[in-house]
Image: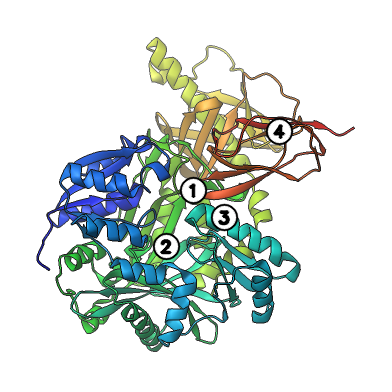
């Protein structure tokens, strides 16, 4: 390789941009960030030596604009581009455009990306290379009739999958023949919207399998190696939730066989750089090729921790034309310990994982041995509706799996994210289960142990209601002291018997009145669910206090948000209450008045009704896309459409009125 580069532009955002920028700077490179209008002050912008604006908030006009990225490279003088993952990272035309511009693409060659970019084509290639594949159909005839016939031929259950996509989008598991047509139409629509291609393939569903992937790396000297496996079996909606290395289900002999198959897959496309070959691992030890991701994976940190390597540094070296820094035997001998990662997402598991946006009121993570946090979150910054819902990765390493698990569980529980609902408590619950601790599970884990009905029915405990009221009292007392220059030691002091402090709190659709009897601002008593509870507080600071109930101490964190919201983190659980102590009474339940509003910021993909239409309860009225996912918005009642306030393509805000209905007579 004749040309060596010295300035790296990272064509991405969020936590992966921060991770790559820091990695490149650690290797001595100058760095350039790119940003949309939504990310003008983001952490990745401030992490880089330089930053260039590439367009408005919408990804298609910024992070997905090849012309804008190349223009930023010219403006900044960058001579190499790292794509991160997502966005343009697996676009062969982007890699080709980078090379045509005389720049270095830090990733595989365009031909390798193209060969593996389409699941149908890559599967045919893998069959030719002798790599085991799941039986199914990957042909060019995309008619519904052919896809249905091939699904029946493979034998249900089957997976209907987007040929051009990943990340669980455009993917449907079908158990019943009667559901095939609808699943195909839905998968095709989502795939076309997400990836620009509605091409599908059919695969036999391997029941109770594990999802195990192999990290591969190739250089320009003909060497390809693997760095063991990662187990990504804990998934929901075919999107990974928990990843770990090594897999509890893989021994040395199986690792060697799977590694050899992954290396063969990479060699079949003359692969250079970091890539991942994904397999389904059946209970009997048989494994089947799923796809190859021609980029750095989200879950690469667990491999780095177990093998003691920096995969971004490897990418930078390989792109310079250097040979791989370690042999296969050296890699094998360097492996030590166990690492587990969870994906922290701004979504609400109780509401069917509905994406969440808003201002981060508090972001704080603990430190300690074996802990790693990859994130871009900061207190005071907003989570945008324009991009993916994953906000951070929490990772722990240990000498053995149980040490890694307990360290990670503590890390997740002690991480504070207030202001936006997240899956943090859900992740902690997964890590705490006996089944996960045993290591004996499959991709069916979430459905078996965390069914949506159980998640949706979870409620705050009486203790959490009480702590929320105490937080409100302390917050108001501190504000009063600050406004009037009072000595904090006088808070709660009375010259006569104290009258109770009354609070009205709402959680979801439930309201609760709580009266606190306060003594000297530090002793509280309340009756909750017929039981008298006494609580003492200490170490009171803005947004933070310690409490003692029945001799047991704990710590509470809280933050006040918009709309009288109180975010409370206590006992390892985060809840959001609404302070309605001074609010007027309400009588109308949400949706009962026929008003259909957006549940989050996003884009209207389709409007399926017009004024005057008769609709039935539950009928889909509009489709909203938020954080790369589509949501069907159904009628809350049977009736007639009165007004439609939006059109396909409109950007909408949370709680914006979309459709107004009148109930049927």
Please give the name of the residue rendered at 47% of the width and 44% of the height, measured from the top-left corner: 553
Q: Nearer the viewer, mark 4 or mark 1?
A: 4
Distance between mark 3 and mark 1 Cα atoms? 36 Å
First in sequence: mark 3 vs mark 2: 3
Please give the name of the residue rendered at 44% of the width and 45% of the height, measured from the top-left corner: 387
Task: Report helix, strand or loop for mark 3.
Answer: helix
Task: Report helix, strand or loop for mark 2.
Answer: helix
Question: Which residue is denoted by mark 3 in the rendering?
Answer: 190
Q: Position of residue 527 (x, y in %)?
A: 66, 33
Question: Which residue is denoted by mark 2 in the rendering?
Answer: 406
Distance between mark 3 and mark 4 Cα atoms? 28 Å
Task: Report helix, strand or loop for mark 1.
Answer: loop
Question: Which residue is denoted by mark 4 in the rendering?
Answer: 590
Q: Looking at the image, do the residues carrying marks 2 and 1 touch, with CB atoms under 8 Å apart?
A: no
Q: Looking at the image, do the residues carrying marks 3 and 2 touch, with CB atoms under 8 Å apart?
A: no
Question: Which residue is denoted by mark 1 in the rendering?
Answer: 572
Task: Characterize the local packing of mark 1: few (<14), some (14-19) or many (20 or more) Cα atoms within 10 angstroms.
Answer: some
Decide if residue 521 is on the left or right side of residue 577.
left
């Amino acid at each position: 390789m004749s040309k060596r580069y010295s300035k790296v532009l990272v064509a991405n955002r969020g936590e992966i941009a921060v991770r790559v920028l820091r990695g490149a700077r650690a290797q001595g490179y100058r760095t350039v960030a790119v940003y949309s209008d939504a990310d003008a002050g983001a952490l990745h912008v401030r992490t880089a030596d330089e930053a260039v604006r590439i367009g408005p908030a919408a990804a298609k006009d910024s992070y997905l604009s090849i012309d804008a990225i190349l223009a930023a490279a010219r403006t900044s003088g960058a001579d190499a581009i790292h794509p991160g993952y997502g966005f343009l990272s697996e676009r062969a035309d982007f890699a080709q455009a980078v090379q045509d511009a005389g720049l270095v693409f830090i990733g595989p060659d365009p031909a390798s990306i193209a060969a593996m970019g389409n699941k149908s084509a890559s599967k045919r290639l893998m069959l030719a290379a002798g790599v085991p594949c799941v039986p199914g159909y990957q042909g060019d005839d995309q008619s519904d009739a052919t896809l249905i016939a091939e699904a029946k031929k493979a034998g249900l259950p089957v997976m209907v999958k987007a040929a051009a996509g990943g990340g669980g989008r455009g993917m449907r598991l079908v158990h019943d023949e009667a559901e095939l047509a609808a699943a195909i139409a839905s998968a095709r629509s989502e795939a076309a919207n997400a990836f620009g291609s509605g091409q599908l393939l059919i695969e036999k569903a391997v029941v109770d399998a594990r999802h195990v992937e192999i990290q591969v790396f190739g250089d320009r000297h003909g060497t390809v190696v693997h760095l063991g496996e990662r187990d990504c079996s804990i998934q929901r909606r075919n999107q990974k939730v928990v990843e770990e290395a090594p897999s509890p289900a893989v021994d040395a002999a199986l690792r060697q066989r799977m590694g050899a198959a992954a290396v063969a897959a990479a060699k079949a496309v003359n692969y250079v750089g970091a890539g991942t070959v994904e397999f389904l691992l059946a209970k009997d030890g048989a494994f089947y090729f799923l796809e190859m991701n021609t980029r750095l994976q989200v879950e690469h940190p667990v491999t780095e921790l177990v093998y003691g390597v920096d995969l971004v540094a490897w990418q930078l070296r390989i792109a310079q034309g250097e040979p791989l820094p370690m042999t296969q035997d050296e890699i094998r001998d360097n492996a030590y310990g166990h690492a587990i990662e969870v994906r922290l997402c701004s979504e609400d598991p109780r509401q069917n994982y509905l994406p969440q946006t808003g201002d981060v009121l508090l972001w704080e993570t603990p430190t300690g041995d074996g802990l790693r946090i990859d994130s871009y979150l900061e207190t005071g910054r907003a989570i945008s509706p324009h991009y993916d819902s994953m906000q951070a990765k929490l990772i722990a390493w240990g000498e053995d799996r149980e040490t890694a698990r307990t360290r990670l569980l503590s890390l997740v529980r002690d991480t504070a994210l207030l202001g936006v609902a997240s899956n943090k408590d859900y992740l902690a619950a997964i890590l705490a289960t006996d089944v996960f601790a045993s290591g004996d599970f499959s991709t069916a884990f979430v459905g078996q142990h965390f069914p949506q009905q159980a998640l949706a029915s979870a409620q705050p405990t009486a203790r959490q209601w009480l702590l929320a009221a105490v937080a409100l009292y302390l917050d108001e007392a501190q504000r009063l002291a600050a406004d009037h220059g009072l000595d904090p030691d006088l808070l709660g002091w009375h010259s006569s018997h104290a009258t109770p402090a009354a609070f009205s709190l709402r959680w979801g659709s439930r309201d609760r009145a709580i009266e606190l009897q306060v003594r000297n601002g530090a002793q509280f008593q309340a009756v909750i669910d017929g039981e008298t509870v006494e609580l003492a507080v200490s170490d009171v600071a803005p947004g933070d206090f310690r409490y003692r109930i029945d001799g047991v101490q704990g710590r509470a964190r809280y933050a006040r948000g918009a709309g009288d919201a109180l975010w409370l983190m206590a006992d390892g659980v985060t809840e959001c209450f609404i302070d309605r102590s001074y609010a007027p009474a309400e009588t109308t339940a949400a949706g009962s008045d026929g008003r259909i509003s957006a549940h989050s910021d996003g884009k209207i993909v389709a409007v399926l009704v017009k004024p005057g239409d008769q609709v039935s309860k539950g009928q889909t009225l509009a489709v909203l896309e938020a954080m790369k996912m589509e949501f069907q918005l159904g009628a809350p009642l049977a009736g007639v459409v009165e007004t439609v306030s939006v059109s396909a393509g409109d950007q909408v805000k949370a709680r914006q009125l979309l459709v107004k209905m009148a109930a049927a007579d």
